Amino acid sequence: MNLDARQARREAARRRTRRQRRAAVAALAAALLLLTVGAFAMGGAGGLSLRGDGEAARSASAATQKQPPAPPQLPRGGREIFPRYRVVGFYGAPQAAELGILGIGTPTRAARRLRTQAAAYRRGGRPVMPALELISTIVNSSPGADGKYRTRQERRVIRRYLKAARRARALLVLDIQPGRADFMEEVRALRPYLEQPDVSLALDPEWSMRPGQVPGQTIGSTTADKVNEVSAYLARTVKRRNLPQKLLLVHQFTDDMITDKKRLRRRPGIALTLNVDGFGDRPNKIGKYKSFTDSRRFHYGFKLFYKEDVNLMRPRDVLRLRPKPDLVMYE
């Protein structure tokens, strides 16, 4: 075969190869077109997604990340203190044993003693929520540098008791004895703690002094409007941070310790509780409780004193009170 013939055959072979490649490309394009049309048809019927597995996985992950976090819970579960739980607590501060049982020994030891005391109140199917009521603003007999007759608890002390409360799955209740300071002034100073889901608040009007009054020489009082101001602040905090219900405990051992009591307001997220305070013998304590609990608008608490009460009432005696206390506090 001469040179011209061989070149002609090679050229013919190259042309056949090019035609085969073009045919293969055309066939592939047609197949892809059919697949795309079919996918759209099935996707329109809700049967097929055109996204790849990787994109679908990324979308699923993004959807999971967009899920809101679970709202914070109370130490023993749930979002409402009352009526689910009965609160049983210890009151005091570490500065002196005379301030209450909570201040005797370490916070951890106090929490252990509280666990034993609270166990006797687990009756009738109502679980107990333990509480450590720490005096966070302590009234003084002297005016101090600012003339307000009060000392604020050191932050490190509050943190110690909060840590102990969390180990015990208990509430920490911060109690305010304001002296000549305003309740709201002291409440705002506690903001970092009140924004926590397991921290509640107590007001002690006995130690709320007007200008010219001195703690220990005068029995203090407060007004419904001042309590309402505090409850409104707490309710805003609960709503803004999506917190569980907070306890607002107001101590009283005379009926006029809260003036204009009928003006007290109930608010969402706040368990307003009037705590019948004061030591004495059983008949006096029971009589005072009955006279202070004539309204069903509020929750009620009952305070017991290990040292000052005459013939200390036992838990079963306390649970015979009507209405049954939602809260029992020991000092």
Image (tube, rainbow, N blue to C red):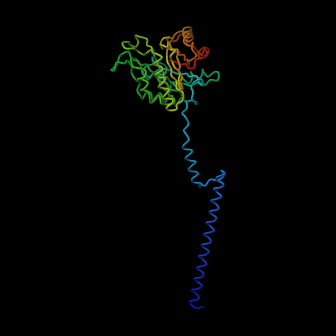
Pinpoint residue 163: horizontal percent, then vertical percent. Answer: 48, 30
| Observer-nearest of 58 and 279 | 58
Outermost residue on the top side: it is 283
Residue 280 falls left or right of residue 156 = right
Outermost residue on the bottom side: it is 2
Q: Is residue 197 above or below residue 40?
A: above
Total numbered badges shown on the rendered structure: 0
Residue at figure coordinates x 63%, y 21% from the top left: 123
Residue at figure coordinates x 37%, y 18% from the top left: 148
Q: Is residue 88 above or below residue 309?
A: below
Q: Is residue 135 above or below residue 163?
A: above
Residue at figure coordinates x 54%, y 8% from the top left: 284
| Observer-nearest of 211 and 322 | 211
Write down the quadrant of residue 145 in the picture. top left
Pinpoint residue 328: horizontal percent, then vertical percent. Answer: 55, 19
| Observer-nearest of 76 and 256 | 256
Outermost residue on the left side: it is 145
Pinpoint residue 10: horizontal percent, then vertical percent. Answer: 58, 83
Q: Quadrant of the N terminus?
A: bottom right
Pinpoint residue 129: horizontal percent, then vertical percent. Answer: 56, 25
